[in-house]
Amino acid sequence: MSCRVGGGQGEAMQIVPCRQCQALVDAEWPRCPACGAIQPGLAEIEPKGYEWESKGQWMGLPLVHIAFGYDSKGQARTARGIVAIGQRAIGGVAIGIIAGGFVSIGIVSAGIFSLGVVSVGAIIAGGVNAFGALSIGVVAVGYKVGGVATFGSKVMFSAMKGAVQ
């Protein structure tokens, strides 16, 4: 089902059902207002973004994988590799908005050695909010800590008087 409705400035809008929830949407809308589907007027989504993998592999993973944007299903791409770089990254060295790996750097990061706004590290964590055995951050929680607000057994340094030990 499809119909054309007069739009502004002499242009006609094509009204079609959303491919996910069947709500009537303009074929040009970037998102469905009812269910949030990306490009609801298209039968298939046009993938957007960038993805690259190195040809070299180790244990089935590419040595380097870079991935941004979303795929043809509307899912955010996830970089997976020995070195992974993307909005979501998982690997030995992971750099992304959300990152997880042996060494991770991101807005939200988790790993053995982690650096980020919210950082969880098994051994070392650094960032605004750091949680790990050795943590340095504005808020640092762990065994050995340093920062503004520190919560740990051994406080290396703290900007707050009477920090919890």
Image (cartoon, grey):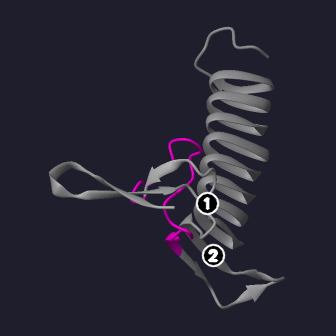
- The reply, left or right, for residue 3 in relation to residue 56 is left
SS type, badge 2: strand
Residue type indicated by callout 1: Ala
In percent of width and height, residue 33 lies at 50, 42
Which is nearer the eye, 47 or 84? 47
Up-down relation of residue 133 to residue 56 (above or below): above
Quarter of the rendering containing residue 10: bottom left
Residue 31, visible in the rendered structure:
no
Would you say the residues marked 1 and 2 are in contact, meaning their CB atoms lie under 8 Å apart?
A: no
In percent of width and height, residue 65 lies at 63, 75
Quarter of the rendering containing residue 154: top right
**Distance from the alpha carbon under mark 1 to that under mark 2:** 14 Å
Up-down relation of residue 131 to residue 121 (above or below): above
Which is nearer the eye, 63 or 125? 63
Label 1 packing within 10 angstroms: few (<14), some (14-19), many (20+): some
Residue type indicated by callout 2: His
* Residue in view at x 69 percent, y 49 percent: 114
Q: Is residue 35 magenta?
A: yes
In the orientation shown, which residue stands out farthest toward the top? 162
For residue 65, the mark is: 2
Sequence-wise, the earlier of marks 1 and 2 is 2
